[in-house]
Amino acid sequence: MLLSLAVTVALAACQREAAAPVATTATPDAAPAPATLTLDESKLPGVNSFKASDLDPSVEACVDFGGHVNGTWLAANPIPGDRTSWGAFEMLDERSQAVQRQLAEQAAAMPGAGGVEAIVGNFWSTGMDAEKINAQGIAPIQGELDAIAALDSQDKIVGYLRTSAAKGQNTLFGFGAEADFKKSDMNMAYAMQGGLGLPDRGYYFDADKKDKLDAYQQHIAKVLELSGVAAADAQAQAKDVIAFETRLAKPSKSSEEMSRDVSLYYNPVSIADADKLTPNFPWAPFFESQGVATPATFSLAIPAFHAEISKMLADVPPAQWQAYLRFHAVDGASPYLSDAFAQEHFNFYSQVLRGQKEMKERGKRVLDVIETQAGEALGQMYVKVAFPAESKAQMETLVKNLSDALKLRIENLAWMSDETKAKAMEKWASFTPKIGYPDKWRDWNGLTTGRDSYIGNVLAANEFNYKWNLSKIGKPVDKTEWGMPPQMVNAYYNPLQNEIVFPAAILQPPFFDPAAPAEMNYGGIGAVIGHEMIHGYDDQGSRFGPTGNFENWWSEADASGFKKLTDQLVAQFDGYEAVPGKKVNGKLTLGENIADLGGLAVAYDAMKKATDGTTDAGTDGLTRDQRFFANWATVWRRNFTDQELAVRLNTDPHAPANFRAIGAPSNLGSFAAAYSCKPGQPMVRSGKDQVVIW
């Protein structure tokens, strides 16, 4: 769940969010009523804290630490029907959503509401009105489908791609603002790959995923049929859509390639050079249509992908373009349309692809949409009732202690030269932590929502967010912005700003508890803090300097030594078998594994210094060190459906949770000492098998 890079927050193509605009009722201009928000904590679900009673004495800590700490809990806590995974993160997400639901209900019932309360209340009220949504059927997007049906030439198709993109509905490729890799204090435009409905390019070619490709084709046919296409025609058009996306998939980069080579995002070109690559899709008119001044350069990432789009504009028949665009228009709108559309969307994307047994109830789905479209608006309400000031103060102390511990580890690295250490220390000194919530809230003026149409509110917010993002192009980076809302259970490192960010919702057990002993917080959120800091020095974060610029600050010898160490970690995780016949991809997950290993080591050092001279209480018969590592494992207790795990093994840069529980500790002598493990036991990696990096 923890992000390794935040460079593509605004660049992901809107593959399943495209639909047509509908009229919305403007929020009243009257002065906002004072918002009095309350929280009934008795209605909130519990948290997942470590308990000594969870320990399984039949599984030795030195043999399978994850099983020792988590086996009993995992066996007793199956995945709920409306989830595809269940563990510490999901339990906190349920708790966060329970808070959000109370706030959304209050906002919807607030007379004369304005500002963020009006936005949240309008989303909630319209999203919960199933009767009105069902009565509207497909009517809210019929105008869009009529426009697609009229695309009978290349010029008309190009024109449609521009106008739909201007509404934040770019089905084909991602487009948005992000910091310039070479001048990270300024934003530039990035165009990315996109256009695929399946999770990764491999789903279109790999034999072991053929069943998912076939199921996707049937899903396409069903969606087209629901939209009014005759059954036989829908089947034929579905084949055309698969052929279309397969062509897009060929030049696309895989999840592994994108996660392990951040330079793929950065390919600055002039408009003239871009036009040479894509002669059928000129870029100056595209920028103009988006309301953006044509820049001298922009990043045309994955150029072969964009070249293929240009070719397809010339040689793919208009009818095939229509099938592709019609499907994605309906598919993207389906979660906000009547039940038949929402159910089919669930049937494929959640049930077939990920093994989810039941659709989330409507309230949870609406809250997911609010978080996507107006997350920081709801977050502004969330922190008023759910984030105590003392939590931020304690977190600041933890960050300082982890930072000090990291400094010492860098200074004492045996494999790194003094020259490179000096550069590493320069980067260390410039880390910027952000805790809880933004110091400056986002301005939502200009977003018009109302009580007439749920999908109307969704589309209005989607377009508003897109234009807000584009407004940054060519302007200085606003370093007060956050890439996540406060109510999200997550954390991230942004290499372009060299910042580590911890939203309020993750600052709860098992990660953080203001009343818990030090070892529990250091083994939880402390290791997360260390993890995010180490991302600045992982295989990709280490390619960015102290100011966030993409630059090489390594000596050739140190870079080579670092590569040898990280290759050892790749080999370690390549050896873990997730399911029979399927192993973890050590290269795909390398960045997260580096961060786990270094982060846990740094957190342990910080914990030892913070508790130096104090008595170990031996709580529950466990030493302080044992409880530190036990809480680390508690964070990673997590069940997955077989289908969810299969998707993650192909696309997720994080290793499955059970291997995160054991991977880093098995390399630490402090873990072996804490549990009196002996050489040769599975949780003791020694000699050439032990990996020590940061």
Image: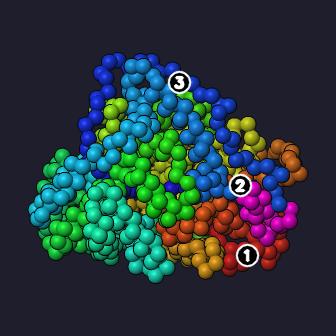
Query: Over which residues does the magenta segment extend?
Result: 57-77
Q: Residue at x 24, y 49 (%)?
A: 142
The answer to whether residue 397 is above or below residue 260 is above
Quarter of the image for the C terminus: give it.
bottom right
Q: Can residue 317 be seen in this view?
A: yes
Q: In this view, does 375 lie to the left or right of 472?
A: right
Q: Name the one closer to the observer, 391 or 130.
A: 130
Q: Is mark 2 on a helix, strand or loop?
A: loop
Q: What residue type is labelled 2?
A: Asn
Give the numbered dot on residue 380.
none
The answer to whether residue 162 is above or below residue 415 is above
Q: Name the residue under label 1.
A: 686
Q: Is mark 1 on a helix, strand or loop?
A: loop
Badge 2 or badge 3: first in the primary sequence? 3
Asked if disc 2 and disc 3 are in contact, CB closer than 8 Å, the reply is no
Q: Mark 2 points at which residue?
A: 77
* Residue 622 part of the magenta segment: no
Q: Mark 3 points at which residue?
A: 37
Q: Name the one closer to the observer, 359 or 172.
A: 359
Q: Which residue is drawn at 39% across and 28% down?
A: 118
Q: Which amino acid does label 3 sit on?
A: Leu
**Residue 92: % across, % down:** 62, 45
Q: Is residue 562 visible?
A: no
Q: What residue type is labelled 1?
A: Ser
Gap between marks 3 and 1, in whole Å?
Answer: 55 Å
The answer to whether residue 273 is above or below residue 568 is above
**Colour scheme in the image?**
rainbow
**Residue 3: % across, % down:** 50, 56
* Residue 75 part of the magenta segment: yes
Gap between marks 2 and 3, in whole Å?
Answer: 33 Å
**Residue 123: % across, % down:** 40, 36
Q: Residue at x 57, y 40 (%)?
A: 96
